[in-house]
Amino acid sequence: MMALTHAAIAATGVSFALGDASPLVMGLAVVGSQLPDLDTSESLIGQALFPISRFLESRFPHRSVTHSLLATAAIAFLGPAGAFKQKVTVSLKSLPNKSFKSPQI
């Protein structure tokens, strides 16, 4: 896939999955979508991070180590998880106004 295709799919998927289209979330999704192609110096991210891409390219073929579940887990673990963490808050005012009666024993 091309860099633009990676970015479009990531931005669309993240916005639907999280229900959020904030610039921070979208930006992180787009950058994260480029990371699997870090193992080739011809990619956009490979050109931006040339020393890392050259190191990976000389040791591993394209679509091997960076396209694995292990790499995905490492990126998820090392990445800024707080940016994707959804905050779910429930205020008492948003709850239905029904009185609760405790059972009589």
Image (cartoon, rainbow, N blue to C red):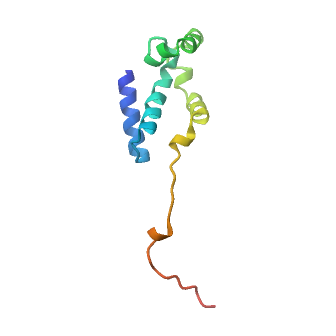
Question: How many marks are shown on the rendered structure?
Answer: 0
Where residue 68 sits: x, y (%)?
55, 27
Apparent side of residue 71 relative to residue 6 in the rendered image (left or right): right
Where residue 74 sits: x, y (%)?
60, 31
Where residue 52 sits: x, y (%)?
57, 15
Tell me the quarter of the image containing the C terminus. Answer: bottom right
| Among the 4 quarters of the image, the one containing residue 103 | bottom right
Residue at x 54%, y 20% (from the top left corner): 64
Residue at x 49%, y 11% (from the top left corner): 41
Please identify the residue farthest to the bottom as the structure is shown. Answer: 105
Q: Is residue 32 above or below residue 63?
A: below
Tell me the quarter of the image containing the N terminus. Answer: top left
Q: Is residue 92 above or below residue 44?
A: below
Residue at x 37%, y 33% (from the top left corner): 9
Q: Is residue 8 above or below residue 48?
A: below
Apparent side of residue 74 relative to residue 5 in the rendered image (left or right): right
| Among the 4 quarters of the image, the one containing residue 17 | top left
